[in-house]
Amino acid sequence: MTTVQDKRTVRAPANGAGALLDVRGAACLLGMTEKSVRHLIERGRLPHRKIGRRVVLVKAEIDAWIDTLPGVTVNQVREMQDRRGEA
């Protein structure tokens, strides 16, 4: 199943592992430019997969990667959004 949300492509894989994002979708999720996401990928700092020449990112892996960064966790951000009614 493929859906388009906020100009990003999200695919739900058959194995239920989580949504797959392209570079544009990851950039939207992270609030970065596509160029910045590609830079992180080239440096090996952002978890990703290559399927041929195509780069895909697993949303669950991105969330886990965010949790390793200093500052608040993904769950804390979601709780703040829920309190504000943004989710």
Image (cartoon, rainbow, N blue to C red):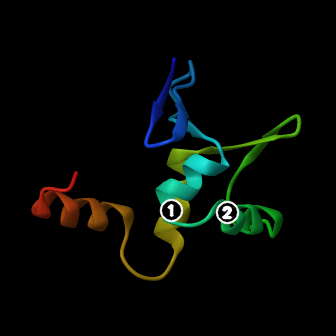
1 and 2 marks in contact (CB < 8 Å): yes
Horizontal side of 71 relative to 80 (left or right) equals right
**Residue drawn where x is 48% and y is 31% of the image:** 4
* Number of the label disc, if any, that sits on residue 39: none
Q: Regarding mark 1 in the picture, which secondary structure is present there?
A: helix
* Furthest residue in direction front, as rendered: 7
Count neighbours of disc 1 (C-alpha within 10 A) and say few if under 14, some if 14 to 19, many if 20 or more: some
- On screen, residue 69 versus residue 74, left or right, reads right
Give left or right: position of 14 versus 76: right
Residue at the farthest bottom position: 70
- Residue 12 horizontal/vertical position (percent): 52, 26
Residue shown at 72% from the left, 68% from the top: 40
In this rendering, is residue 85 above or below 32? Answer: above
80 relative position to 74: left or right: left
Residue under label 2, please give it.
37
Above/below status of 76 relative to 63: below
Report x, y in % for residue 81. Answer: 21, 61
Q: Earlier in the sequence, mark 1 or mark 2?
A: 1
Mark 2, residues whose alpha carbon is within 10 Å: few (<14), some, or many (≥20)?
Answer: many
Residue 23 percent across, percent down from the top left: 66, 50
User: Which residue bears the numbered disc 1?
Assistant: 30
Alpha carbon separation for disc pair 1 and 2? 9 Å
Residue 55, located in which quarter of the rendered image?
A: top right
Which quadrant would residue 44 be assigned to in this image? bottom right
Task: Give amino acid for label 2.
Answer: Val
28 or 18: nearer the viewer: 28
Q: Secondary structure at mark 2?
A: helix
Count of all numbered marks drawn on residues in the image? 2
